[in-house]
Image: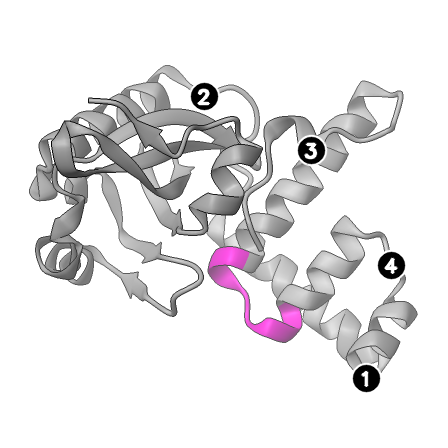
C-alpha cells in the first residue's frame, strides 16, 4: 500500500454523502491496513470496503470460507473502533494544526525530545518498504538519535495523502541542496500523533504529488 493524492480519493457518486462515505472507506482501509491489522484481516477489509467485493468473492480469492472472511472483517472493524481511527475525518481542528506546526518546527530543528512529546505513548513509526516497526516513545527516540540521525537538517514540505496530513521530507545533500527522502504520512488522534509512516519510494511517489526530487540550496 502507498499513499494516494487527495484528488485520487474522489468517487463517481453524485450524492455528496456518498462521496464522503467513499472517501472515508478508502482512508479507513488505508489506515487499518498500514498500522493495525494482520494480513488476513487487512486483505478482507480492503477487498470489501475499497473494491466492493462480496464475502464470497473474498473467500474465493483468499482460499478460505465465507464464515472466515466475515470473522476477519468483524475483528478488523473492532480494531478500527478500538483505535478511533475515524477521529481525523474532515478539516483539521486548530489543535491539530498547532500540533503539525510543532511537528515541523521540531523536525527542522531535529529536536528529538520535542518530536517524541508530540506522539501518543503507543505511537508507531514505520518505513515501507523496510520492515522497520517501532512502537512507543523510547524505541522511537532511540532510533531517531541512532540510525535515523541522518534526518537531521531535513526540510519538510506539506502535502495531503489519503485524507491525512503528510509531508515530503528532503534530506540535506552536498552543496546545501536537499534530496527527496520520504513521504511522511501522519495519523492524528486528538491532540497527538498516533502513527508516523515514512514511505521511501520517492522516485514513484514524488512525481505523483507534483514534488521535485531535489530542492535547490
Few, some or many C-alpha atoms within 10 Å of disc 4 (few <14, some 14-19, many ≥20)? some
Q: Which residue is mark 1?
A: 63
* Mark-to-mark CA distance, 2 and 4: 32 Å
Mark 2 or mark 3: which comes first in sequence? 3
Mark 2 or mark 4: which comes first in sequence? 4
Q: Which residue is mark 4?
A: 53
Which of the two residues, 94 or 206, is positioned nearer the viewer here?
206
Q: Where is the N terminus found, in terms of image quarters?
A: bottom right
Mark 4 or mark 1: which comes first in sequence? 4
* Mark-to-mark CA distance, 4 and 1: 15 Å
Which of the two residues, 124 or 2, is positioned nearer the viewer here?
2
Q: Which residue is mark 3?
A: 9
In the image, is residue 61 above or below residue 207? below
Q: Which residue is mark 2?
A: 92
Which of the two residues, 3 or 62, is positioned nearer the viewer here?
3
Local secondary structure at mark 3: helix
The mark closer to the camera, 3 or 4, is 3
The mark closer to the camera, 2 or 3, is 3
Mark 3 or mark 1: which comes first in sequence? 3
Tell whether label 4 touches label 3 (CB within 8 Å). Answer: no
In percent of width and height, residue 63 lies at 81, 84
Amino acid at each position: 500500500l502507498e499513499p494516494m493524492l487527495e484528488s485520487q480519493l474522489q468517487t463517481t457518486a453524485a450524492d455528496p454523502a456518498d462521496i464522503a462515505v467513499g472517501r472515508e472507506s478508502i482512508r479507513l482501509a488505508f489506515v487499518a491496513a498500514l498500522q493495525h491489522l494482520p494480513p488476513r484481516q487487512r486483505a478482507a477489509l480492503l477487498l470489501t470496503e475499497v473494491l466492493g467485493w462480496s464475502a464470497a468473492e473474498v473467500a474465493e480469492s483468499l482460499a478460505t470460507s465465507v464464515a472466515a472472511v466475515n470473522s476477519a472483517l468483524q475483528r478488523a472493524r473492532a480494531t478500527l473502533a478500538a483505535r478511533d481511527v475515524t477521529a481525523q475525518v474532515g478539516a483539521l481542528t486548530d489543535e491539530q494544526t498547532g500540533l503539525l506546526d510543532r511537528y515541523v518546527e521540531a523536525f527542522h530543528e531535529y529536536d528529538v525530545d520535542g518530536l517524541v512529546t508530540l506522539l501518543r505513548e503507543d505511537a508507531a513509526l514505520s518505513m515501507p518498504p523496510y520492515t522497520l516497526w517501532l512502537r512507543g516513545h523510547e524505541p522511537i527516540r532511540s532510533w531517531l538519535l541512532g540510525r535515523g540521525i541522518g534526518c537531521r537538517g531535513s526540510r519538510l514540505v506539506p502535502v495531503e495523502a489519503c485524507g491525512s496530513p503528510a509531508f515530503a521530507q528532503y534530506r540535506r545533500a552536498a552543496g546545501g541542496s536537499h534530496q527527496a527522502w520520504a513521504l511522511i504520512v501522519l495519523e492524528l488522534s486528538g491532540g497527538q500523533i498516533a502513527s508516523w509512516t515514512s514511505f521511501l519510494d520517492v522516485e514513484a511517489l514524488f512525481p505523483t504529488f507534483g514534488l521535485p526530487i531535489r530542492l535547490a540550496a
